[in-house]
Image (cartoon, rainbow, N blue to C red):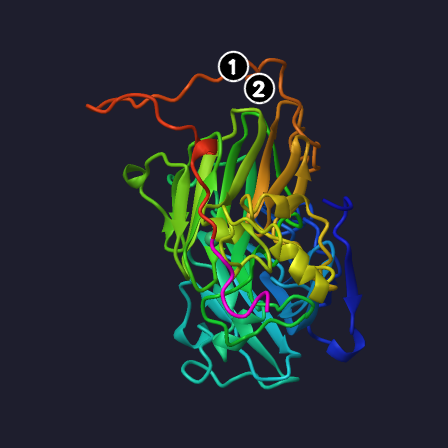
Amino acid sequence: MAGAALAAAAVGKGAMAGLPELITMDRPDTQPPLLPGNGRPYNPVVTLNGWTLPWRMVNGVKEFHLVAEPVVREIAPGMKAHLWGYNGQSPGPTIEVVEGDRVRLFVTNRLPEHTTIHWHGQRLPNGMDGVGGLTQPQIAPGKTFVYEFVARRPGTFMYHPHADEMTQMAMGAMGFWVTHPKGAHPLIERVDRDFCFLLNAYDIDPGSYTPKIMTMLDFNLWTWNSRAFPGIDSLNVRKGDRVRIRIGNLTMTNHPIHLHGHEFEVTGTDGGPTPKGSRWPEVTADIAVGQMRQVEFIADEEGDWAFHCHKSHHTMNAMGHDVPTMIGVDHRGVVKQINSLIPDYMVMGERGMADMGEMEMPLPDNTLPMMTGTGPMGPLEMGGMFTVLKVRRDQKQGDYKDPGWFKQPAGTVAWEWTGALPEAKRATGPSAGTVPAAREIEVQVRKPTGHAGH
Ligand SMILES: [Cu+2]
C-alpha cells in the first residue's frame, strides 16, 4: 500500500476539452479507498493492487473517462508485461457508483485496433451493452464513444471489451465495477472491509514482455489483477471485522479460491445478492469463467492466513510447466557427463521441486522464478494466485497498511519432534507386522535414453 492520497496525474487536458479529465495511475500498488466527495454516500471498496476512478458530477450525472490503451504493468517486482488496459494500468480502474445513479462513461480508444466496452451483469438499454457489431458500431482507434445508463441494481460487476475478445482480454483489458446499495438492503450487510479483484492469466515466454494471445489453456502466469505472488498485496484487516471479498474470473478456466482459518459464505454473484437461505459455510469457492462471487466472513482468528487458488499449478509462475518428474532419479554421473557439454547444467527435482524455491538459478531477464517468496519461517514456495489475509487485533479501522508478519504466541507453532521414531507396523490384516522403512525401499532408477554417453 503506497501513499495516503490517490496518486493520479491528469494528462492531455487540452486535447480533451469537454470530456472529463483523463486520470491515469502510474503504480501497481493497492490504493486507499476513494471516499465519495459528492453524490449518494457509500462505503468504498479497496481494489487489490488497483484503484478507483474518480468521476465528475455534471447535472446529477456521474461522468467517468476510460481510455483503452497499451500499458506497462509490473506483474511482480522484477517482471513487467506489455499489456492493454485502461488509464495506465491493467486491469483498468474500478468504477464505483450507487444504485439509482445515472452514469455517463466516455470511452476513448488508444489501442491499435477497434474496441468496445461491455458492462458485464448490468441492467441497461440494449444499445448500451457494448457488443461490437451487435448493439453498436466498433470504436475505431482514436475515437471516443459515450455510454449512459442508470445503475439499476446493486452488486458486483466487471467491464471488458466485446470486440476481438480473445486478443483484448488475453492482453489484460478488463476492470471491476461495484454498484453500492442505496441505503439499507435486506441482503447486503454493512462490512468493515470490502476488497475486489479480477482473476486473469497470461502466457508470456520467459525473457519476453508481451502475452501470447493465441494460448487457450496453457498459461504460465496466473494473476490477480495482473499481479503474481509475491507481487500481490496482502489483505490487511482488524480482528473482528466483517470482510467482503469480491472476485471475478476472466481467465479460460475455473479457480477454486481457498481461505485458511475461517469459513465464509457466498453472499452475491454478478446476478446480485444471494437469498439468505441459499448460503452455507465453506472455505473454498469455485469461480467459473465469466462468473463473479462475493464472499463474506468475520475475521475473528488472528494470524497470517494463506488465501489462494487451490489449483496448485496456479500458485506457480513461469517455467513451472513441462518439466519431467525426476523424483527418485539418481543423477550421479549423468551430471558430470552433461557438465562437460553444458557447464551450467543443474539437476532439477531429484527430491521434489521444493529446492526451486530457494535455488538462486540464473533466469532470463524479466522472468519470475516459478516458486518464490520468503516468509518469517523460510521459503514460501509460492507464485501466481497467492496472497495472505493478515488479521490483527491492533489494525486500526480504515487502515489498510501491511502490519508485517504475525508473531505467534509462544507454544502455538508446530514444533519439531526430536525423540526416537518407532518402527512402522501394518495396521491390520493377516500379514500384520513390520514393514520396511522408506529408506530401505530401493529407488528405481530411470536410465537416460538416446545416445547419452556415446
Ligand atoms: Cu486457479
* Front residue (pair 416, 327): 327
- In this picture, residue 325 sits left or right of residue 187: right
Q: Residue furthest left?
A: 430
Assign the magenta stretch its main secondary structure. loop
Residue 393, above or below 30: above
Q: Say which amino acid is labelled 1.
A: Ala
Q: Residue 128 at x, y = what percent?
A: 46, 73
Q: Say which amino acid is labelled 2.
A: Trp
> Residue at label 2?
415
* Front residue (pair 452, 371): 452
Q: Under tag 1, what secondary structure?
A: loop
Identity of the residue drawn at 43% across and 41% down: 188
For the N terminus, the image quarter is: top right
Q: Under tag 2, what secondary structure?
A: loop
Identity of the residue drawn at 41% across and 41% down: 284
Q: CA distance from mark 2 to mark 1?
A: 15 Å
Is residue 284 visible to the viewer in this orientation of the structure?
Answer: yes
- Mark 1, residues whose alpha carbon is within 10 Å: few (<14), some, or many (≥20)? few
Q: Residue 253 at x, y = what percent?
A: 42, 60
- In this picture, residue 399 sits left or right of residue 428: right
Residue 298, above or below 199: above
Q: Is residue 374 magenta?
A: no
Q: Residue 147 at x, y = what percent?
A: 53, 73
> Residue at label 1?
420
Q: Which residue range is magenta in the image?
A: 446-454
Q: Quadrant of residue 73?
A: bottom right
Is residue 99 visible to the viewer in this orientation of the structure?
Answer: no
* Front residue (pair 225, 215): 215
For the C terminus, the image quarter is: bottom right
